[in-house]
Amino acid sequence: MSQHIYDVIIVGAGAAGMMCGARAGQRGHRVLILDHARAAGEKIRISGGGRCNFTNVHCGPENFISQNPHFCKSALAGFSPQDFIDLVEAYGIAWHEKTKGQLFCDGRAGQVIQMLLDECEKGGNVIRLETDIHEIEKSGEDFVVATSKGRFTAGALVVACGGPSIPKMGASSYGYRIAEHFGLNIITPHAALVPLTFADTLKVEMQKLAGVSVQARVSCNKTVFAEALLFTHRGLSGPSILQISSYWSQGDSITINLVPGTDILITVKTARKENPRQSPAGFLSGFMPQRLAQFIAGGNTAIRLADMSDMALQTFAEQVNAWTVKPAGCEGFRTAEVTRGGVNTNNLSSKTMQAVHIPGLYFIGEVVDVTGHLGGHNFQWAWASGIAAGNAL
């Protein structure tokens, strides 16, 4: 097979990989981007319901999970949400802000992909898709990548092939295998931003609520999110659950306040005085969908508030303001939006993303142990870490 020589080889034509390639190419480097997929930026294409939640105006280090919570600070400071907004606007891409600072394209996510491809073209990047990587080795100061399309050599190798979340998009653990091959450590990967599932009786009961949605306050291990919650046939989903899933581990319970901002105990005691014949389900239907009200009240419409003791009212109120359940598991990488864990940040420079003990080897994006909250933060990490490496190359 013939051998092609470049300055930089990037493994992965996703958000981080293309951002890094564009910056490195525009700084004068000969860049090759390799990916096994048929099209670049496939995760970008499906993100945000097809409109790409490309960043968050409030994005900061507090929106990320890592064994080293300080690691992301340098890269995020070096490339801000406004920097990406400026790029988007330079390409005439219209956008809008939704709740909690989330920014989306007015049109389709493909606009962001095309923007990145155009930026890569400006930098003279070569992008080879549908290319399988067979082996990566270091030969002297260079990296040699053997692929289904030939052998390629470069002085620098950037690993930007993500984690195993959403395998139907071609995602895998390949980036971790590259890291381990070169002696780097991996923080055990877990599915994150993923629906939680339940078993046995609770699952059967919850199936009756499939499709019901409420604004809720969900907590686990001292972390709290207040966003929408959705009941599904398998358990719980919605933004609040996806957020808390990144902090949940097997065996943990979660506590849900189904009516945040209202002290149900005080309110129901008042209702017992003013409307003693009202049923518990009837009372709750003023605060939540009727199906959920009946579920919490136990379905007994014959009982009246007047029949309930103070202790019974307290138990009833706790089921609303502090409903504690223990998920059996989660839906796993199949539906997880991102992966928690990855390449140990202790092995990387926070300023350049370069491996501490292997000059020329870089890891960026989701493959690194930096996981963002829902709402555009993971894309901002992809842009920022890609730029950090691109500037350092």
Image (cartoon, rainbow, N blue to C red):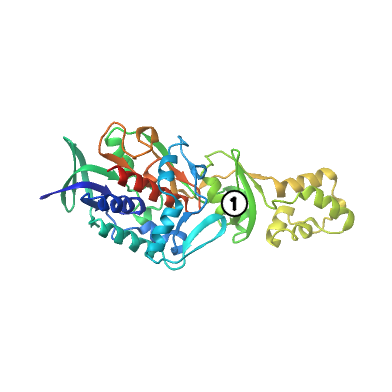
Q: Which amino acid type is shown beneath numbered disc 1?
A: Lys
Considering the numbered disc 1 on the image, is that residue within a helix, a strand or a loop? helix
**Residue 105, position in %: x, y?**
45, 64
Q: Identify the image quadrant of residue 289.
A: bottom right
- Asked whether, in this view, residue 99 is left or right of residue 357, the answer is right
- The correct choice, above or below, for 127 with respect to 159 in the image is below
- The correct choice, above or below, for 349 with respect to 44 in the image is above
Dot 1 crowding, Cα within 10 Å, few <14, some 14–19, many 20+: some
- Which quadrant is home to the C terminus? top left
**Residue 167, position in %: x, y?**
37, 52
Q: Relative to the observer, which residue lies in front, 305 or 226? A: 226
**Residue 184, position in %: x, y?**
32, 34
Q: Residue furthest left?
A: 2
- Asked whether, in this view, residue 277 is left or right of residue 338, the answer is right
Residue 337 in sight from this viewpoint: no
What is the total number of numbered labels drawn onto the structure image?
A: 1
Q: Relative to the observer, which residue lies in front, 152 or 164? A: 152
| Residue plotted at (20% across, 50% down) | 30
Provide the residue designation for mark 1.
203
Residue 384 in sight from this viewpoint: yes
- The correct choice, above or below, for 144 with respect to 357 in the image is below
**Residue 127, position in %: x, y?**
24, 56
